[in-house]
Image (spheres, rainbow, N blue to C red):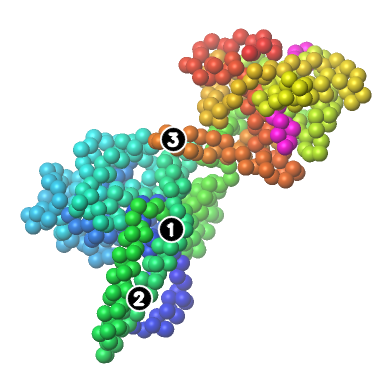
């Protein structure tokens, strides 16, 4: 952002140069101006008035006669909210309705003669003096875009545009390479919006472009554009002298032409993705505007999303367990919210029934204990052991907590890596089984551990995501209703609520995966921040029978339950 004091200093130092105010995002988008531009910004950033208006203005100027398209989720949003702001931006640049363009009606014959295509219906169309046309498209009626061919597409408020409808509209971006292929804006897109919240029905399809950006190329473009800008300032200063040097002006003109040519090459085919907050434009918005939004107009989640341009915490918009909510948690009634010291304090635990366990063999050993309770499946307790502790220490924690449990049977589901070196009898699954069945002195504890994952296959993360959606939705009668003790499984709840989702694209298909970078954190941070315990929960729940149900059509009958034999 150019502060007022800096702008005044520039004006004082260069009285021959006009100073125009702009925020950093306007300067960057003007300077970088790649073929594809995606700007995710906070409220008041002037995304329509500045970014969309200036980009569309440049398309009209640089590709006279070109067909363009402005697309939104509905015509009402496009006509009533977006385009009035774009027209305001055009007016600020000296392009006025009735003089430089007309909308919704047939343009003068001279304008039509300059157009590269034949337009039969001007009702949803802007026509420009140089023959360019801007079609208006609504994604709720995509048939009106069918058959059209345009050289640049504009999307504003893109978070309201459904992925599949956007994909159906994309084929219109093909144009005429012979006529317009020399421009760096040919076959380009301009996408603006604020940060989406997927959990609230908004869409994030445009985030895929972030990975397409080449940061080094963007820096190079910005450097070249700034150098060109300095040459333009020097040219203007030279032109305003009483006796300008023709030789110097000729040299400057050649240098500017060189940079113009180079910038077209640098920008062409490139993508620029940026995310900015409303604070970029605080000189115009005023601090009071930001303060009022923070102080009560918006709740914190909305403020962080719509003003700061960030995803606050790990709420549903970026969580892997996106449907995990308060309905899935319960308080077992322990006094003062303190965790239970032994299993007898767990009021929903059936001491005369066996236990199920889910285990992850990672840097942190993670064990999650659950049990079927009629229509519910309750996760009662999570246990873990940090390095240098190992199987013996974790088993001792289990034995101590469940010492009063009557039916000492544990059915253990675990990571398939626990079967490695099974033939050599050095596998991790065997070691935890032996550590629970025998204490540190080799005496029998009375517990019997049944290893349920001896033939466990890899569970793809995409399948886990879909399974958890099906389970946590709670409307599949063949699956139990999930309930997690939020006091005695505090670390598990944190692990699930903080497990981030990542997105990969295979063609046009979106694949959601669990981001597991947190498992590399220092050991003391693992219990509350890593995804280890959520993986133990995964193995506990994703037993073969329930996986099969989730993959098939939704069941209507309750799932018959025999303790320990869901496989």
Give the residue pinned by disc 2.
Answer: 231
Q: Residue at x 45, y 62 (%)?
A: 219
**Residue at the image point whose x is 20% and y is 51% from the top:** 178
Most extreme residue toward the left, as rendered? Answer: 109
Compare residues 332 and 265 and report the one nearer the observer: 265
Q: Which residue is mark 3?
A: 506
Image-quadrant location for residue 339: top right
Kindly state the secondary structure of the residue where label 1 is placed: helix
Q: How far apart, in angstroms, are the residues tagged by discs 3 and 2?
A: 45 Å
Disc 1 residue crowd, few under 14, some 14–19, many 20+, Cα 10 Å: some
Q: Is residue 467 left or right of residue 187?
A: right
**Numbered range of the magenta stretch:** 351-366
- First-in-chain label (3 vs 2): 2
N-term mark: 1 or 2: 1
Residue 74, image x, y percentages: 30, 40
Residue 397 belongs to magenta span: no
């Amino acid at each position: 952002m150019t502060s007022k004091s800096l702008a005044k200093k520039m004006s004082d130092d260069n009285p021959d140069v006009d100073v125009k105010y702009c925020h950093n995002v306007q300067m960057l988008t003007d300077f970088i101006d790649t073929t594809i531009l995606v700007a995710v910004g906070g409220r008041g950033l002037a995304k329509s008035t500045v970014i969309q208006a200036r980009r569309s203005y440049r398309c009209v100027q640089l590709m006279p006669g070109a067909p363009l398209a402005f697309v939104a989720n509905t015509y009402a949003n496009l006509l009533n909210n977006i385009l009035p702001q774009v027209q305001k931006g055009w007016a600020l640049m000296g392009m006025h309705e009735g003089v430089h363009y007309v909308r919704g009606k047939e343009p003068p014959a001279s304008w039509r003669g300059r157009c590269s295509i034949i337009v039969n219906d001007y009702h949803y169309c802007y026509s420009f003096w140089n023959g360019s046309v801007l079609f208006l498209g609504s994604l709720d009626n995509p048939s009106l875009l069918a058959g059209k061919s345009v050289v640049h597409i504009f999307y504003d408020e893109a978070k309201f545009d459904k992925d599949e409808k956007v994909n159906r509209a994309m084929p219109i971006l093909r144009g005429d390479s012979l006529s317009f292929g020399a421009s760096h804006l040919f076959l380009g897109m301009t996408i603006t919006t604020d940060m989406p919240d997927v959990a609230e029905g908004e869409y994030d399809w445009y985030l895929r472009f972030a990975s397409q950006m080449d940061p080094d190329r963007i820096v190079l473009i910005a450097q070249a554009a700034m150098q060109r800008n300095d040459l333009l300032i020097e040219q203007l200063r030279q032109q305003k002298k009483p006796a300008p040097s023709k030789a110097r002006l000729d040299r400057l003109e050649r240098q500017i032409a060189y940079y113009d040519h180079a910038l077209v090459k640098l920008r062409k085919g490139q993508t620029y993705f940026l995310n900015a907050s409303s604070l970029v434009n605080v000189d115009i918005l005023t601090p009071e505007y930001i303060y009022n939004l923070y102080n009560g107009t918006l709740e914190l989640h909305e403020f962080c999303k719509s003003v700061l341009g960030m995803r606050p915490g790990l709420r549903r918009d970026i969580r892997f367990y996106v449907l995990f909510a308060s309905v899935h948690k319960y308080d077992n009634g322990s006094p003062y919210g303190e965790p239970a010291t032994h299993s007898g304090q767990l009021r929903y635990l059936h001491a005369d029934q066996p236990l199920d366990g889910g285990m992850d063999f990672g840097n942190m050993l993670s064990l999650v204990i659950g049990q079927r309770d009629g229509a519910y499946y309750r996760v009662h307790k999570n246990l873990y052991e940090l390095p240098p502790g190992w199987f013996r220490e974790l088993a001792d924690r289990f034995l101590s907590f469940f010492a009063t449990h009557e039916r000492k049977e544990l059915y253990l589901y675990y990571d398939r890596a626990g079967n490695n070196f099974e033939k050599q009898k050095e596998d991790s699954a065997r070691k935890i089984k032996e550590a629970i069945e025998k204490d540190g002195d080799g005496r029998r504890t009375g517990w019997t551990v049944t290893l349920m994952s001896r033939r466990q296959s890899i569970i793809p993360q995409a399948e886990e995501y879909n399974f958890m959606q099906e389970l946590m939705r709670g409307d599949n009668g063949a699956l139990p209703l999930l309930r997690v003790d939020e006091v005695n499984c505090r670390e598990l709840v944190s692990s699930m609520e903080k497990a981030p989702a990542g997105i990969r694209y295979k063609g046009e298909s979106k694949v959601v995966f669990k981001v597991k970078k947190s498992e590399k954190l220092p050991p003391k941070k693992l219990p509350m921040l890593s995804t280890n315990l959520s993986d133990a929960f995964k193995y506990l729940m994703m037993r073969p029978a329930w996986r099969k149900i989730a993959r098939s059509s939704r069941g209507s009958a309750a799932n018959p339950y025999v303790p320990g034999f869901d496989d």
